[in-house]
Image (cartoon, coloured by chain):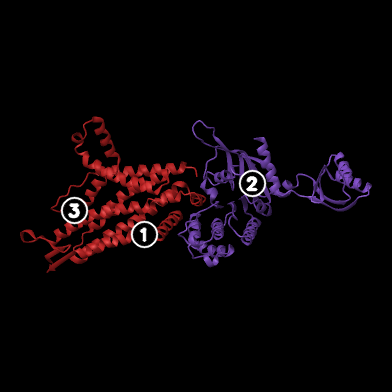
Amino acid sequence: MTETLIEVRALRKEYASRVGKPRIIALDGIDFTVRAGELFGLLGPNGAGKTTTVKILLGLTAPGAGTAFIGGLPVSNPESRRHTGYLPEGHKIPNYLTARQAMTIFGRMSGMSSNDIKERVPALLERVGLAQWADIRIRKFSKGMTQRLGLACALVHRPNVLLLDEPTDGVDPVGRREIRDLLREEAKNGTAVLLNSHLLSEMELTCDRVAVLRKGKVAAEGTIDELTRRTAKYRMIATPVDEPLLAMFRETGAGVERVNGHLELSVNDLQHLNALVDGLRSRGGMLQELSQMRSTLEDVFVDLVKTEGQQS
Amino acid sequence: MRVVWANIEDVWREAAARWTLITYFILSTIFIVIFASAVNLDIVDGALAGARLFGKDVEMRGGGIGIEQLVMYSELVFSIIIYGFSVLLAVFATAHLVPRMQEKGTVDLYLSRPVSRPALLLSRYVAGLLLAASNVVYLTGAIWFIVAWKTHIFNPRFLLSGVIMMFVIAALLAFAFLVGTITSSTAVSIMSSYALCLMSIFLSIVHGRIDAVFSHDWLAAVVDGLYWIVPKAWELGGSVAAYVTGPISHMKIPAPGLSAFVSTGMFGITCLVLAVWRFQKKEF
């Protein structure tokens, strides 16, 4: 069985508010695990508790209740960060340093020897496409370059857990693909990657599994496939499509919608779908195309957020 | 140990990149050059035949003062000036170390490393002290060398007085770290450190005559209490002077008692402990 590297159990966090106002619940008992070699995404609207979760995992903030472990160690123990790499959102790597100096300082703070640093830094800079910029001060870097350097700093000590907050923020499409490839490679080598991003398409392309946080709780969790195949929806192009046909479909309990010359059908199962096709044929209709529709991660996300709006 | 080295490297590189280090040493060099060019001594057969300070002849009373005495006087004056100058510069050059580290987006990078918060804060404190010490060594060392070169009189006490200066700087830096940890503001750290320095001088001056200065007993008690809490910048300045001139000097500058050192040390340690405690508890 694959080793669990990040474990969060019944994590709860409240923030004090102004006197007389209720406390703000940032996390309300969330649970999740990330295994070695897994790319796990945390999604959620602003204020859902994503950043608080990452901060607790890094010991930047103490949990109100519950437990969090990295590599089997409680996150209150600094040793849990020995093999953890972190890229914060909007990070400020001291801009008076060069890329090489920054990586050397952070490598040393992670306990690396000088020889190891000398060997690792050029290789990593090459890997993130900054080899030519190794000795240039960071203040000269573009946002995308700073982001790549942040990633290199997070990876310098060969971590087996990576916590990344908006890793592709400000990076061009080619760079985004490179970062995606790099993360996949890290995961392939057994690193557990926890991604926190608003770029849903990016998460969809990168993550194996995601959890959607809503109001400090896990509203949904699963693989991208599981989350996006929640409803059995099909796209049908057929002729002729008239109102009596649609009425017949609706009578079976199917959801039917006309969209740009095709039909979107919501059915209970495959038998139900076949019954609709039989109905079409019995009325002399011709089936031109039938394909399963998949909701995107964005659809799932928006649905969940809408639910939140309706509940509140 | 690697954490300490990493912080020292970080602090020194920042000081170099932000011109702090250069300004620090340019100001000190100007000070040294002024001193070197201001002192002109005529030494004949190992004895002082004449001396000019800032272009003016030094009066040789009763057949002239001895060269040892002149060296002692100049080193006394310069040790006091260096004391004030180095404390002023040290606070200015290092007070930003905590506020800047605590900035959002930066503190996460430091705290995500396998370093305990006390170790991180204390290694930064050590790095700041080393930066200040480099300047004190440069100032006292250069003046000492110039004096020795011009007069062939070596007074190691002048050189060693830098240790007392560093003791005071260490206490003030601990206070600046405490303020920086609480407020995350460089300006507030600098202002409050200077204010503390001024207050300690004021308290030292009035302490001997509290009853005469304050009409209310409670006010006298508060001032007396404060006097024993704050670092003794004034007394330790006197200590620098007394140490430089030495016990055999005819000047007989009174040295403050051990209590000035103990209370200053206690103040520094307390500030540092509180800063570590606050930093440990702080949520980012």
| Chain in red on the image | B
Q: Is residue B97 visible?
A: yes
Q: Position of residue A137 (x, y in %)?
A: 48, 62
Q: Nearer the viewer, mark 3 or mark 2?
A: 2
How crowded is the residue under tag 1: few (<14 C-alpha within 10 Å), some, or many (20+)?
Answer: some
Residue visible at 52% across and 53% down?
A91
Q: Position of residue A113 (x, y in %)?
A: 49, 59
Residue visible at 23% across and 30% down?
B216
Is there one chain holding both mark 3 and mark 2?
no
Please, which residue is most extreme toward the bottom here?
Answer: B45
3 and 2 marks in contact (CB < 8 Å) = no
The mark that comes first in sequence, 3 or 1, is 1
Q: Which residue is mark 2?
A: A43
Q: Nearer the viewer, residue A249 or B82?
A: A249
Q: Which residue is mark 1?
A: B21
Give the alpha-carbon distance from disc 1 to disc 2, as whole Å: 45 Å
Q: Please report, as a chain letter, where disc 3 is located.
A: B
Q: Nearer the viewer, mark 3 or mark 1?
A: 1
Looking at the image, residue A142 sits to the left or right of residue A40; the answer is left
Label 2 residue SS: strand
Res B246 label: 3
Q: Looking at numbered disc 1 in the image, what kind of residue is underneath it? A: Leu
